[in-house]
Image (cartoon, grey):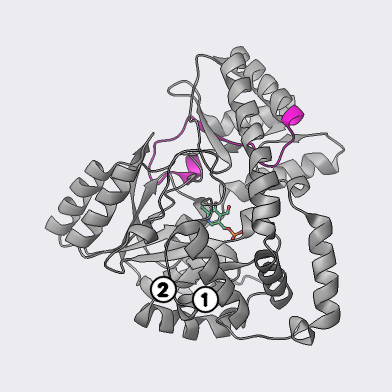
Amino acid sequence: MRYDKFLAGRANWIKGSALADVMKKAAELKAQGRELISLSAGDPDPNLIPREVLGELAKEILAEVPASVMYTPASGIPELREEISKFLEKYEGYRVSPDDVIITVGGTGALDLLGRVLIDPGDAVITENPSYINTLLAFEQLGAKVYGVPVDGEGMRTDILEEKLRELRAKGVKVKFIYTIPTGQNPIGVTMSEERRKRLLELASEYDLLIVEDSAYNFMRYEGEATPLKAMDKEGRVVVAGTLSKVLGTGFRVGWIIAQGEIRQKVLMEKSPIDFCAPTISQYIALEYLRRGYFEEYHLRQGLPGYREKRDAMLKALEENLPEAEFTKPIAGMFVMLFLPEGADGMAFAEELMEKKGVVVVPGKPFYTDESGRNAIRLNFSRPSKEEIREGIKRLAELYREKF
Ligand SMILES: Cc1ncc(COP(=O)(O)O)c(C=O)c1O
């Protein structure tokens, strides 16, 4: 039986992710008994998450809150919306009404919902180039035409953004919104400078655009400044897709949208038939985690310093083993982007590295919106141990030397 005749026309826009291919290959090797060092995932470290404390919380909630195993409002449980609104005021520096907080199935659910209410097939959307692969796929699956704007050490090149906006306007192309991950960008590990943040907002105002701010790594900042765009937004142009995934754990699936007016209303209507509600038990755990000050106690005081050490271990290992190579130096997030020599094939390198040296990395190419980034390799430092980071980079450097 062939099923293609049953598929929606829209299904033609659905493409697989090269990331999934890497993970599949790694899983196959593991099943064959190979020991692999993974510098690939976008996960936090399970040992830097207070799992025992969360276990106690889960037990307490399940015993004492009958609603925790039930459907709850599509917008999220009211207590958590209230708590997130306080949390954002305290740690992100902006005030939003709990009514404008919608609890989603992670940042992924937030971005999908925003795409659904904002994108018509053929709409132009601007992103950083490179950008987070799942968002690119989600927007493309909705029929968006994605235009990438290059990134340098200070984030999105707002001068090139301006040129692009002018050029698209001259061609009669209406841009809907700009999607950005200003802090600890995935995959390139760069944080947008304060100047560029201001300029981005000015351009959004001048061209009457929305900004979708993905704040996934805002709570993974090791040093420096990174004022959330939403905190600088005087005109209500910034819609936020946030998540607790990188803090609480990616398995909880608790994220949020901060949106007002018609966007908020339509997101709510769209949401219920899709997921009913974000996982209720996770929402209660997130609520108590924030309420009891565990974010401060466990994440800020213990987690963050641990991630900073790992970031430092990776940069040191790269400086010692590959001093001639170009790589980014993140002040936030979970990733370093390494650039192989010009013309090198990052996909082939990643495959060979996994097979010959047992180290899993993610090729950068699939994160790019054009043909650039062929020589880029994304390295994760949050999940592996410091020993794995040192050993992984040593082996990566060996292959680099063998090939270039
Ligand atoms: C930039 C960015 N946004 C969103 C997400 C999705 O996170 P969540 O687990 O909350 O769906 C990720 C996950 O890696 C990410 O890197």
Which one is in front, 10 or 58? 58
Say whether mark 1 is within 8 Å of ligand 1. no
Q: Is residue 31 left or right of residue 201?
A: right
Note whether 290 is above or below 324 in the view shown.
Answer: below
Q: Which residue is mark 1?
A: 102
Let me know if residue 379 is in the magenta part: yes
Task: Write down the region rendered in magenta.
Answer: 365-388
Q: Quadrant of ligand 1?
A: bottom right
Q: Which residue is mark 2?
A: 259
Which residue is pictured at 79% across the width and 39% down the height?
Answer: 29
Note whether 201 is above or below 336 in the view shown.
Answer: below
Q: Position of residue 22 (x, y in %)?
A: 65, 43
Residue flagged by tag 2: what amino acid is it? Ala
Which residue is pictured at 63% across the width and 58% down the height?
Answer: 245
Residue 358 visible in the current orientation: no
Q: Position of residue 377 (x, y in %)?
A: 54, 33
Give SS at disc 2. loop
Question: How far is disc 2 from disc 1 in space, using C-alphas?
Answer: 8 Å
| Among the two numbered marks 2 and 1 on one chain, the one whose residue lies closer to the N terminus | 1
Which residue is pictured at 58% across the width and 42% down the height?
Answer: 334
**C-beta proximity under 8 Å, tags 2 and 1:** yes
Residue flagged by tag 1: what amino acid is it? Ile
Quarter of the image where the C terminus is located: top right
Which one is in front, 326 or 302? 302
Tell me, for residue 64, which label it has, or none: none
How many callouts does the rendering have?
2
Residue 298 visible in the current orientation: yes
Q: Residues within 10 Å of mark 2 (few under 14, many from 20)?
A: many
Residue placed furthest toward the left: 170
Quarter of the image where the N terminus is located: bottom right
Q: Residues within 10 Å of mark 1 (few under 14, many from 20)?
A: many
Let me know if residue 103 is in the magenta part: no
